[in-house]
Image: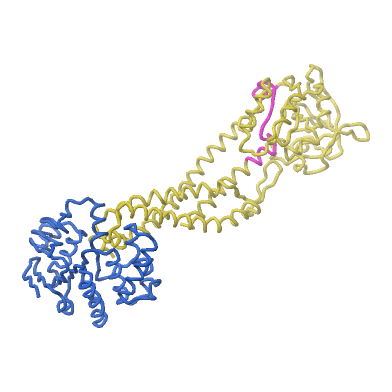
């Protein structure tokens, strides 16, 4: 029974840990836990669909305790060229100081230096470019990149920037992005102080939908969306994958169930003679049923307690250190080398409840059988 | 003398059709209060079956058993359990002690069912242990007692509830001669001092010598019933 509990907890921890890691990778790479946009910007992004009342929005985010960090962003498609080469790109304006509090952009710098708001000695503002842009335009750190786009006021936007860093690798979702400091991007796109998006992180990522709902109440004119809505396709794919893995988990649970069943049957059926003796000396049937249930309950509690003591360090190690993968997994330039579990109270609690409920349910039929057995038959059993 | 056990036309068979074996064939006996009765006969004559039916451990296919005037067939499960608990003590050939309980706990359990206070239970356990000569061994589990000691615990357990009737199925069969005699002396003394009714199923001549009544069974029928 102890082994079954440990197997259940370990598998559950691994399953939940894997998805939590996946969510972290995804949300910290780009989306954050919640995003705020103007109206239907997510479905039909246009440069003029901006968030203008930034003070009110930021005030609302500050007022919600669960929001731990947020960052503003602007977006626009642009044509990038260097020398005689051109490439389509996506301009993303980010606040150099706030962005690292929400995403892993700073960690994704593969070459060069993470930028700031200040211009270089020649008065050019800095840009960080995706690996795809760097390859297509044959650009290196310190070289100039020219961007042409359309301003929010309908004007032609064009400017020269200096490459300060290359971001991610060829597989990164932002391999064709050109990151600009927020103020430079706003000026380049004639946006004034407006932004297109706020991305934020919350204290408990599993509560992000609730927090989004609270924020939506504070700023009804804008759209507040949890990452599950922002990246609905990814979320649906993950959920269906999760369902598949729950099936595997079900098989493990079944194995644990068989283990519990075996323990209960061993405990009750092999002592039929003993129960016959108790019946013959005057135990009422209900007394025997209660006794068997109590005994199984105690047996399960002891088994689970031992199981918790044994599996807790293993799950903790698995969560903190993890299993070294033979090949590291690259997620948009962020490398993950360990498969990790999840260490939380529910990881231990739900299997515990399952074990107790299963043991009690399974023990009822043999308990009733033992309680109503004819003493003569039981005394004849060995 | 009061009749405490009354069987009428008790009939019991096992198996079916061609394999049917008649264990008891219309057995009618009356047992008086305070009798020290031995049911004797060859193996398969129906001795143990008769004891089981008298004690309500088995159900007859025909006939009736009355204990102190009450037909046990008319009792429901709980009433029969309570009757066994308060009026009948069982001693089995294989001792049938609960292996995970100590000797004291084995004796105490039936009093726990009777709702006797802890202090009274402890007192009576010590009395019973002294009566069967097991002082100082109460904390031992059955596995750490000899066969004779285990059977003494079984006797103490059977008497702890102060029953009217003690049913003993081959109680000395697994004991050496000396231990068997010693145990019989204990039971005979209880029979004489407390007027408990004892019924044995046995092959043991030592029991037959001490019994006040011998009921001979053969092929499920009472062949002879003699009072000494």
Quarter of the view holding residue A179: top right
Horizontal side of residue A67 vs B208, given as left or right:
right
Residue A301, x across and y down, in percent: 48, 55
Residue B185, x across and y down, in percent: 23, 78
Q: Residue furthest right?
A: A121
Horizontal side of residue B223 vs B164, given as left or right:
left
**Does A62 appear in magenta?**
no
Which of these two is toward me, A58 or A122?
Answer: A58
Horizontal side of residue A139 vs A239, given as left or right:
right
Residue A43, x across and y down, in percent: 64, 23
Residue B60, x across and y down, in percent: 14, 57
The tally of labels here is: 0
Q: Residue furthest bottom?
A: B178
Q: Relative to residue B63, is residue A135 depicted above or below?
A: above
Q: Relative to residue A156, is residue B17 depicted above or below?
A: below
Quarter of the view holding residue B174: bottom left
Chain A's colour? Answer: yellow
The chain that appears blue in the image is B
**Does A30 appear in magenta?**
yes
Q: Residue at x 92, y 31 (%)?
A: A123
Q: Residue at x 8, y 69 (%)?
A: B218
Q: Quadrant of the C terminus of chain A?
A: bottom left
Which of these two is toward me, B143 or A45?
Answer: B143
Horizontal side of residue B112 vs B88, given as left or right:
right
Quarter of the view holding residue B6: bottom left
Q: Residue furthest top?
A: A154
- Magenta stretch bounds: A23-45
Which of these two is toward me, A222 or A131?
Answer: A222
Which colour style is shown? by chain
């Amino acid at each position: 029974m102890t082994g079954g509990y440990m197997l259940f907890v370990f598998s559950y921890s691994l399953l939940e840990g894997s998805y939590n890691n996946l969510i972290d990778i995804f949300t910290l790479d780009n989306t954050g836990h919640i995003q705020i946009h103007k109206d239907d910007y997510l479905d039909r992004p246009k440069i003029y669909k901006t968030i203008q009342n930034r003070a009110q929005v930021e005030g609302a985010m500050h007022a919600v305790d669960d929001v731990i960090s947020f960052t503003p962003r602007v977006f626009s498609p642009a044509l990038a060229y260097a020398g005689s080469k051109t490439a389509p790109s996506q301009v993303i304006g980010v606040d150099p100081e706030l962005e690292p509090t929400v995403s892993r952009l700073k960690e994704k710098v593969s070459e060069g230096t993470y930028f700031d708001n200040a211009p270089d000695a020649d008065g050019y503002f800095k840009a960080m470019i995706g690996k795809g842009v760097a390859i297509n335009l044959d650009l290196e750190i310190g070289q100039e990149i020219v961007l042409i786009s359309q301003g929010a006021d309908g004007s032609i936007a064009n400017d020269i920037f200096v490459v300060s860093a290359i971001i991610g690798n060829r597989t990164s979702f932002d391999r064709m992005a050109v990151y600009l400091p927020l103020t430079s991007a706003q000026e380049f796109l004639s946006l004034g102080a407006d932004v297109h998006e706020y991305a934020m992180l919350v204290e408990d990522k599993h509560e992000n939908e609730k927090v989004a709902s609270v924020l939506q109440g504070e700023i009804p004119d804008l759209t507040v969306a949890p990452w599950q809505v922002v990246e609905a396709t990814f979320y649906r794919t993950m959920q269906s994958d999760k369902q598949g893995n729950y099936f595997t988990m079900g098989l493990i649970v079944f194995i644990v169930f068989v283990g519990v069943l075996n323990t209960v049957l061993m405990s009750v059926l092999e002592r039929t003679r003993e129960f016959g003796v108790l019946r013959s000396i005057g135990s009422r049937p209900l007394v025997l049923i209660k006794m068997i249930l109590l005994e199984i309950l105690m047996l399960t509690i002891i088994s689970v307690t031992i199981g918790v003591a044994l599996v807790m360090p293993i799950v903790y190690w698995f969560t903190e250190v993890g299993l070294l993968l033979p090949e590291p997994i690259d997620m948009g330039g962020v490398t993950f080398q360990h498969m990790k579990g999840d260490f939380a109270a529910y990881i231990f609690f739900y299997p515990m409840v399952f074990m107790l409920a299963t043991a009690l349910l399974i023990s009822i039929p043999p308990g009733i059988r033992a309680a109503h057995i004819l003493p003569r038959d039981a005394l004849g059993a060995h | 003398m009061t009749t405490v056990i009354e069987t009428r036309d008790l009939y019991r068979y096992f198996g079916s059709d061609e394999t049917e074996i008649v264990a008891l064939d219309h057995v009618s006996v009356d047992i008086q209060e305070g009798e020290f009765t031995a049911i004797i006969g060859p193996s398969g004559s129906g001795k143990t079956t008769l004891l089981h039916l008298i004690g309500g451990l088995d159900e007859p296919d025909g006939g009736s058993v009355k204990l102190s005037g009450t037909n046990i067939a008319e009792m429901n499960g709980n009433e029969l359990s309570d009757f066994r608990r308060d009026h009948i003590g069982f001693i089995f050939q294989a001792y049938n002690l609960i292996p995970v309980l100590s000797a004291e706990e084995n004796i105490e359990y039936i009093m726990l069912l009777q709702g006797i206070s802890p202090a009274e239970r402890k007192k009576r356990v010590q009395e019973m242990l002294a009566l069967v000569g097991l002082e100082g061994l109460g904390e031992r589990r059955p596995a750490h007692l000899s066969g004779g000691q285990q059977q003494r615990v079984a006797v103490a357990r059977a008497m702890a509830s102060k029953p009217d009737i003690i049913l003993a199925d081959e109680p000395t069969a697994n004991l050496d001669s000396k231990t068997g005699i010693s145990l019989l002396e204990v039971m005979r003394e209880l029979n004489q001092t407390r007027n408990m009714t004892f019924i044995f199923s046995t092959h043991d001549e030592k029991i037959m010598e001490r019994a006040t009544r011998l009921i001979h069974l053969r092929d499920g029928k009472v062949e002879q019933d003699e009072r000494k």
